[in-house]
Image: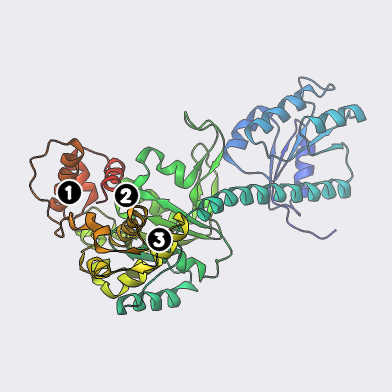
Amino acid sequence: MEETKFGSILIVDDNEDLLFAAKMLMKKYAKEVTIEKDPRKIPFLINNYSYDVILLDMNFTEDTTSGKEGFFWLKKIKELDPQAVVILITAFGDVEMAVQALKEGATDFILKPWQNEKLIATLSAAIKLKESYKQVEKLSTKQKQLQADLKKPFTEIIGSCASMKNVFSIIEKVAKTDANVLILGENGTGKELIARAIHDRSNRADEIFVTVDMGAITESLFESELFGHKKGSFTDAKEDRAGRFEIADKGTLFLDEIGNLSLPLQSKLLTVLQRREVTRIGTNKSIPVDIRLICATNMPLHDMILQNDFRQDLLYRINTVEIFLPPLRERLDDIPLLANHFLKIYTTKYRKPFKGFKGNAMQLLQNYSWPGNIRELQHAIERAIIMAEGDELEGRDFFFLSAKPNSDKVAPTNTLNLDEVERNMIQKAIDKNGGNISKAAKDLGLTRASLYRRLEKYGL
């Protein structure tokens, strides 16, 4: 038989001579063989190590013939790892016991003393089954992520100005490499679209693209979301769950708003990026991951390093190549392209046959400062189409834009409306701290996640 490496094998039997004999036989075929005579150590081993196949004796010293102990530990193994591949072994087997073992979740059943060739053949079949389990789990997880991605609108990049042509040039140069990319730009400039464009042109284009909004993840859920957890590792851990790093294996992981991470979380992220492996909460098992990393932020990371708010070594790790996206107010020539693109999308969506823009409508759009950038333009076109009459959009259909200040400063107000008061205070805190979300949140007595939700709510 060809000496193919199987993987990691655990053998549990109270007969030490059998254990050592089996280990001597299998070490020629398996990458790692672990032997254990005490079945009470099974939970510890399962929780801390990964095994492709488990060989389990059915009868230990307390009960030498009935097989009850074997069935008990088989059930315990399947509770700890429902996808465990277990082969039961016994010297007192019969057809009835074999059938019961299979019903209880065993993959196969062998008698001892065994024939070496038959044992190796059984292990080979079991290893193939384990690999199929892994593939099904990975495909299922990725399918869920892909279904979520399909719901995301606007996957095209629109732009013809000089600054965007430079962005397109960088994308073409960096896409085919595995270099880490950092995308910088204000909120609403299309950083995720750039990340997806890099992925779609990369050698990983056929693999998954996973997005993580770092600003929306609380510190308590950070490790669970990114690195995964084991069932029962904390109160709400009702099932084993792969983290975003595992899901993105062989594909691209996009960490958006990375500037919002606290220093302790930056340290944990850096460790994973350096080791290229994750450990799920509740286990000590290291899981290797192969990802292409793209990060984005609207925060001034280089300035934050000087203020000790961002780790310099993490910045070096994530910004092999930097891409800066200009704000929409610096892309005036692109506004007609973008406006007509959104017009086409929303006339189709709402079944309203608008021909285009009339009179001074386009000039009004080009004169507006767009503090919310492309995202604000998109929402403005959608709102105008919903509310407008006739078959062309006019300047008056965008009356709500003229009511907004073109300055980043917040005008004094005597309003007692709670939403308006809160919006103004948030804007003042952001202005005071130069756009630093962490410091603004601290001044306001909020968590970064809470402030981030309010920024989205008020379009800031």
From the image, tell me which residue sits under label 2.
261
> What is the three-letter code of the residue carrying label 3?
Glu
Contact between marks 2 and 1 (CB within 8 A): the answer is: no
38 left or right of 443?
A: right
From the image, tell me which residue sits under label 1.
427
Q: In the figure, 131 relative to 322: above or below? A: above
Looking at the image, is mark 2 or mark 3 earlier in the sequence?
Answer: 3
Is the residue marked by circle 2 packed among few (<14), some (14-19), or many (20+) residues within 10 Å? many
**Which quadrant of the figure has residue 342?**
bottom left
**Which quadrant of the figure has residue 85?**
top right
Query: Which one is in front, 359 or 56?
Result: 359
160 left or right of 97?
A: left
From the image, tell me which residue sits under label 3.
192
Q: In the figure, 189 relative to 440: above or below? A: below
Percent position (x, y) of residue 9?
Answer: 70, 45
Percent position (x, y) of residue 231?
Answer: 55, 33
Instruction: Tell me what residue is drawn at x 62 percent, y 44 percent.
Output: 50
The kind of secondary structure element at disc 3 is helix
